Amino acid sequence: MMLPKDYVRLKLTGERASEITDASGTMMLDCATGTWDDALVEAAGWERGKLPHLLHSFDPAGQLRPELCRRWSTPRTVKVAAGCGDNYAGALGVGAASPGRAALSIGTSGVLSAVDGTFRPAPNHAILTTPHAAPGTFLSMAVVMSATQSLDWLSRLARLPAGDLAEMAEHRIASVGVAGRPIARPSITGVRTPDNRPDASAFFSGITAAHDIADIAYSVLEGVAFQFLDGFSAQRSAGVPVAEVQAVGGGTHSRFWVSLMATLFDTDVSIPESGDISACLGASRLAHAATTPDERDAILARQPVARMTVSPVAGMREPLMARHRAFRALPFKTG
């Protein structure tokens, strides 16, 4: 069995191997120990001998084949790192390599990836907990199935750019506040954390003739932020430390949207200069660490330059939390 990136590495190096972050997605890994679990392997109908040996993400996993070195005019010795999955690389790209640091990815879907020094699984809240790509750590991942996808969906309906909708929502709240706005669970592709309802459809409540597209846009932004809060709260209740948050992804282009999350989390959220390439940066750091093992920890923990830091909005958390209670009371409807 070869996972996609491991197959690419096989072609590059001739070495058959995998690493613990991607292997966690096979449902055959003991995530507490980072080893194949014999009982799970048997239940899946596989044989241990057909599974690749496991490396850490920062380990060298072979050298570039000589014929490829000649074709690409590289040095004769080029190490290839084991690598990792995308969310793990994105976390490393913002220096989330030690307990308490977290990466908030606001993309098509959303993930709050929090680094922990202890294995604290929370399957009852649909939180994925696996070994991290940084040494001696685990990654707790709370997932929002539709983040910017929810705003893009509204953008198509309204025939207005998503960025314009976010600005309209910001101006509306600046002028009239959050009271009286519709409340939405914009779960157009289901809910993962904490309810694990893949069958759930979106739900809007409180829309009247007095509301317009700016109000609806705000309810979508707020509803996504509420889903992130649910994940954040589930992680905290499981004992996962979340002290420093770096936000990446297309959703960070709306400072207002990030400010909703900072206010709900009651913590500063930093947006790095390199946020759009965080996963690529994390992967390159693993390559650097594989070739410079003595500097591994410093390489993986390097902090990015902040483009801006978004702080909680004074006086806004209490009304938002009141609306969050109404959000949690919304019924689950299936499409």
Image (cartoon, rainbow, N blue to C red):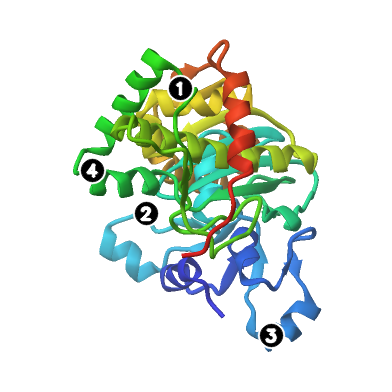
**In the image, which is nearer the foreground, mark 1 or mark 3?**
1
Q: Is residue 288 visible?
A: no
Q: Which residue is mark 3?
A: 49
Q: For the residue labelled by badge 4, is the local secondary structure a helix, a strand or a loop? A: helix
Q: Residues within 10 Å of mark 3 (few under 14, many from 20)?
A: few
Judge left or right: residue 221 versus residue 124.
left
| Residue 288 percent coordinates (x, y) | 51, 43
Residue at the top extreme of this rendering: 314
Q: Earlier in the sequence, mark 4 or mark 2?
A: 2
Q: Are marks 4 and 2 in contact (CB under 8 Å)?
A: no
Q: For the residue labelled by badge 3, is the local secondary structure a helix, a strand or a loop? A: helix
Q: Earlier in the sequence, mark 4 or mark 1?
A: 4
| Residue 107 percent coordinates (x, y) | 41, 44
Q: For the point 43% across and 35% down, which residue is it?
A: 219
Q: Are marks 4 and 3 in contact (CB under 8 Å)?
A: no
Viewer-closest of 109 and 323: 323
Q: Amino acid at mark 2?
A: Pro
Q: Earlier in the sequence, mark 1 or mark 3?
A: 3
Q: Amino acid at mark 3?
A: Gly
Q: Examine the image and state in which quarter residue 22 appears.
A: bottom right
**In the image, which is nearer the foreground, mark 3 or mark 2?**
3
**In the image, which is nearer the foreground, mark 2 or mark 1?**
1
| Residue 216 percent coordinates (x, y) | 36, 36
Q: Residues within 10 Å of mark 1 (few under 14, many from 20)?
A: few
Q: Which residue is mark 4?
A: 158
- Disc 4 to disc 2, C-alpha distance: 54 Å
Q: For the residue labelled by badge 1, is the local secondary structure a helix, a strand or a loop? A: loop
Rendered image: mark on residue 305 = 1
- Disc 2 to disc 1, C-alpha distance: 32 Å
**In the image, which is nearer the foreground, mark 4 or mark 2?**
4
- Disc 4 to disc 3, C-alpha distance: 55 Å
Q: Which residue is mark 2?
A: 75
